[in-house]
Image (cartoon, helix red, strand yellow):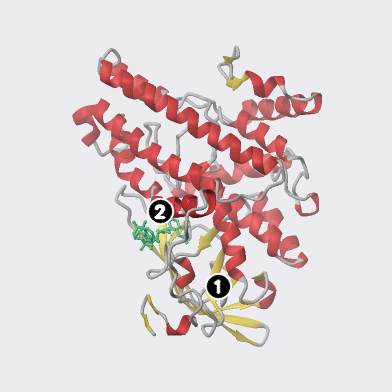
């Protein structure tokens, strides 16, 4: 596959451009013109992320914007994108989407990869919650929530993990008890990215503990500012504080905010987790200049002639390309109308392993400079990358869990023994529950 660089420095695939139909070429031009008018081009890396990111590696040396600044920038960008008819490209038109084919989403991603897009805080909402609400929400709910989500007037989070239920999230203990037209939610969630700035969340809770653990769960939309919701920040090793503990004390949710049938929330949760793996694992596209910051750092320290460093730079480049191709394959499947499947785990796992490898290389190039820990110093980005990378091996399902999924559902290996699968949840010894 050949690559070329156009006169303004855009790196793109020749093949992608060559296969555009006339309509697609026109759409590509529209996206590029809009991006050029509204956003700066990337300075260094297509792995670059801000402090609110779920991606572990911030690559551009710069003072961190505050949460308020990043939210304001995101909202301004997304509402302008919406007004230009470029948001929700393949979402239904009746809820504010554009109803365009998935190929146009791919073109948008290819073109936007060259720009500093301030939309990381929308990954969970648009990548995971939106498709879930569209699939499982009632007409009334879709009418109310999808458009403001697309415009980033309202930002969403995902409330799945609990202190005793992470990899095995079906062991969750949070209760939702029916009371007339409402459910009453009690319990605790943890590691909730962005809860402190989000307006709404998708939550799963146990509605029938007499059923086996996967069969007594229901999914709801919850207002993050409802009475009884308490959000407490958790400080991360990076010094940032992007995720939270969220406590629910008699939080009332109307039945109309149930997503899917009662006790069948597990199906919706599995679909949302598959979208999560794709949202985290298959972005990028393998083009752009992701090698640039490593190369620049090596040159600055006179290591660009070092044969070992050169070998590792080449290895990183190759792996970045492979990740891009995995992403293309996932998007091609989506384009062919397939829902995200277990193959999404391959990109998620590969991306997490690559982040670790890349941050190690950056730290080795920077040497003692990688110990720097203030935002103003160029080398501090490597320190941040090293401590941030392990989170990528946990968020969205750990590396071990992705390997289990790939083994069982892609390679067809025997399933792990699940002795508790058919037992009533209330009889299990999980979390704080002692059977
Ligand atoms: C940056 C970040 C952002 C996050 N954001 C969110 C969010 O927005 N919303 C949310 O709900 N959650 C979020 N999480 C939580 C995340 O989904 C969980 O941390 C993850 O699923 C792992 O669960 P756990 O931490 O409870 O670890 P555990 O499940 O307790 O795992 C502990 C260890 O045991 C291993 N292990 C567990 N089960 C198996 C098995 N069957 N086979 C082999 N090994 C196994 C794991 O791989 C891990 O090494 C986030 C986490 C991170 C790091």
What residue does disc 1 label?
226
Is residue 160 shown above or below 360? below
Figure quadrant of the N terminus: top right
Figure quadrant of the C terminus: bottom left
Specify the quadrant of the image occupied by residue 112: top right
Q: Position of residue 409 (x, y in %)?
A: 53, 53
Binning the other alpha carbons within 10 Å of mark 2 as few (below 14), some (14 to 19) or many (20 upward) gives some
Q: CA distance from mark 1 to mark 2?
A: 31 Å
Camera-near label (1 vs 2) is 2
Q: Nearer the viewer, residue 95 or 318?
A: 318
Q: Position of residue 155 (x, y in %)?
A: 58, 55
Residue sitting at x 51%, y 77%: 422
Judged from the image, the quadrant occupied by ligand 1 is: bottom left
Is residue 188 shown above or below 310? below
Binning the other alpha carbons within 10 Å of mark 1 as few (below 14), some (14 to 19) or many (20 upward) gives some
Q: Nearer the viewer, residue 278 or 93?
A: 278
What residue does disc 2 label?
398
Task: Respond yes or no on whether mark 2 lies under 8 Å from ligand 1.
Answer: yes
């Amino acid at each position: 596959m050949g690559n070329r660089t156009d006169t303004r420095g855009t790196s793109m695939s020749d093949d992608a451009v060559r296969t555009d139909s006339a309509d697609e070429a026109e759409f590509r031009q529209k996206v590029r013109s809009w991006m050029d008018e509204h956003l700066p081009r990337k300075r260094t890396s297509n792995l670059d992320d801000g402090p609110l990111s779920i991606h572990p590696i911030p690559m551009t040396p710069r003072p961190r914007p505050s949460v308020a600044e990043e939210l304001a920038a995101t909202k301004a960008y997304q509402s302008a994108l919406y007004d230009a008819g470029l948001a929700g490209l393949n979402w239904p038109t009746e809820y504010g989407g554009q109803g365009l084919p998935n190929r146009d989403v791919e073109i948008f991603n290819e073109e936007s990869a060259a720009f500093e897009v301030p939309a990381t805080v929308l990954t969970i909402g648009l990548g995971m919650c939106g498709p879930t609400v569209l699939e499982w929400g009632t007409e009334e709910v879709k009418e109310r929530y999808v458009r403001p989500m697309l415009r980033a007037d309202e930002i969403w989070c995902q409330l799945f993990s609990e202190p005793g239920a992470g990899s095995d999230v079906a062991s969750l203990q949070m209760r939702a008890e029916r009371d007339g037209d409402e459910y009453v939610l009690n319990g605790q969630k943890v590691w909730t990215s962005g809860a402190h700035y989000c307006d709404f969340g998708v939550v799963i809770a146990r509605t029938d503990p007499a059923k086996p653990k996967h069969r007594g769960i229901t999914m709801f939309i919850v207002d993050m500012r409802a009475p009884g919701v308490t959000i407490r920040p958790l400080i991360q090793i990076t010094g940032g504080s992007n995720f939270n503990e969220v406590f629910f004390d008699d939080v009332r949710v109307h039945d109309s905010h149930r997503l899917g049938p009662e006790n069948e929330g597990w199906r919706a949760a599995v679909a949302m987790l598959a979208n999560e793996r794709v949202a985290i694992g298959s972005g990028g596209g393998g083009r752009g200049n992701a090698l640039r910051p490593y190369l620049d750092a090596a040159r600055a320290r006179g290591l660009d002639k070092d044969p070992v460093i050169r070998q590792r730079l080449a290895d990183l480049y190759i792996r970045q390309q492979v990740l891009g191709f995995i992403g293309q394959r996932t998007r091609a499947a989506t384009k062919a109308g397939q829902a995200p499947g277990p193959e999404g785990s391959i990109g998620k796992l590969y991306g997490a392993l690559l982040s670790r490898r890349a941050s190690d290389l950056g730290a080795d190039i920077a040497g003692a400079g990688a110990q720097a820990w203030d935002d103003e110093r160029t080398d501090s980005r490597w320190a941040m990358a090293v401590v941030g990378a392990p989170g990528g091996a946990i968020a969205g399902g750990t590396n071990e869990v992705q390997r289990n999924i790939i083994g069982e559902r892609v390679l067809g290996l025997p399933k792990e023994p699940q002795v508790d699968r058919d037992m009533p949840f209330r009889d299990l010894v999980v979390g704080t529950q002692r059977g």
